[in-house]
Image (cartoon, rainbow, N blue to C red):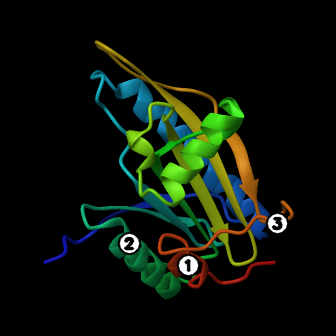
């Protein structure tokens, strides 16, 4: 049996456009991430994956749960459709590698390991932990990240968020089991 996701209602400012909605979700999620960081006391503390579903009138719903992330994305998409959401934000920690920070030979080796060797990124010594914020509206998306620094005997430190990309960047697109149910559920605004 799949655990029931938890929902918490929020009162946010109404938005007149998708850009306003995305900006507001970014502010809520990144401010919340830093507030959680301030409460951490253990080196292994981590950010709980959450979704924030937003309706243009200012109603927001935080959703989290213990189900598989793909099941939660389906749940969030169905919930967003039901309430007439115009934007959804998602926050979760992940592993990344920056091939631009490697020698060309190592970058090519890492590319082979990941693409054709089935090596998970977390198995690579160059991996870096990050906190990702994905923001979606019916017509646009953005992704931001903040590197996470871990210490022995101290809680993790979150670096400043940086924009990774979005629908306004030529040649970039985003799709998949964590994105499609969300984007398909959203109502166009403005």
Image vertical order of residue 119 relative to residue 54, above or below: above
Q: Position of residue 59 (x, y in %)?
A: 54, 67
- Disc 2 vs disc 3: Cβ atoms closer than 8 Å? no
Instruction: Pinpoint residue 85: horizontal percent, then vertical percent.
Output: 58, 77
Left or right for 7, reference 78: left
Q: Residue at x 49, y 50 (%)?
A: 113
Asked if labels 1 and 2 touch by Cβ distance under 8 angstroms, the answer is: no
* Residue at mark 3: 171
Q: Is residue 28 left or right of residue 51?
A: right
Q: CA distance from mark 2 to mark 3?
A: 26 Å
Q: Quadrant of residue 55?
A: bottom right
Query: Of the residues under marks 3 and 1, which one precedes in the sequence?
Result: 3
Q: Nearer the viewer, residue 50 or 104?
A: 104
Give how far apart the Cα atoms at labels 2 and 1 are.
10 Å
Q: Secondary structure at mark 2?
A: helix
Looking at the image, residue 86 sits to the left or right of residue 151; the answer is: right
Q: Quadrant of the N terminus?
A: bottom left
Residue located at (36% from left, 66% from top): 69
> Residue 34: which numbered mark, if any?
none
* Residue lying at 55% horizontally and 72% vertically, measured from the top left: 179
Answer with the quarter of the image where residue 169 lies. bottom right
Comes first in the chain, label 2 or label 3: 2
Q: State if disc 1 and disc 3 touch (CB < 8 Å).
A: no
Spatial distance from mark 3 to mark 1, Cα to Cα? 18 Å
Q: Is residue 180 visible?
A: yes
In terms of depth relative to the viewer, which is nearer, 9 or 146?
146
The residue where tag 2 is placed is 70
**SS of the residue under disc 3:** loop
What percent of the width, then of the height, locates residue 155?
35, 21
The 10 Å Cα crowd at callout 1, few under 14, some 14 to 19, many 20 or more, is some
Mark seen at residue 180: 1
């Amino acid at each position: 049996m799949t655990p029931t996701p938890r929902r918490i209602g929020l009162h946010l400012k109404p938005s007149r456009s998708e850009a306003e909605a995305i900006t507001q979700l970014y502010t809520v999620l990144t401010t919340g991430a830093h507030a959680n960081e301030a409460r951490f006391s253990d080196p292994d503390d981590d950010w709980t994956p959450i979704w924030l579903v937003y309706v243009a009138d200012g109603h927001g719903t935080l959703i989290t749960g213990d189900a598989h992330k793909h099941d939660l994305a389906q749940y969030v998409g169905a919930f967003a459709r039901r309430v007439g959401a115009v934007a959804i934000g998602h926050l979760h920690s992940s592993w990344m590698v920056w091939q631009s920070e490697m020698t060309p030979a190592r970058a090519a080796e890492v590319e082979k390991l990941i693409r054709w060797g089935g090596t998970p990124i977390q198995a690579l010594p160059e991996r870096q932990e990050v906190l990702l914020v994905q923001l979606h509206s019916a017509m646009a998306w953005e992704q931001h990240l903040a590197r996470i620094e871990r210490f022995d005997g101290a809680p993790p430190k979150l670096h400043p968020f940086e924009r990774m990309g979005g629908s306004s960047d030529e040649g970039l697109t985003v799709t998949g089991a964590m994105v499609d149910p969300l984007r398909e559920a959203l109502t166009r605004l403005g």
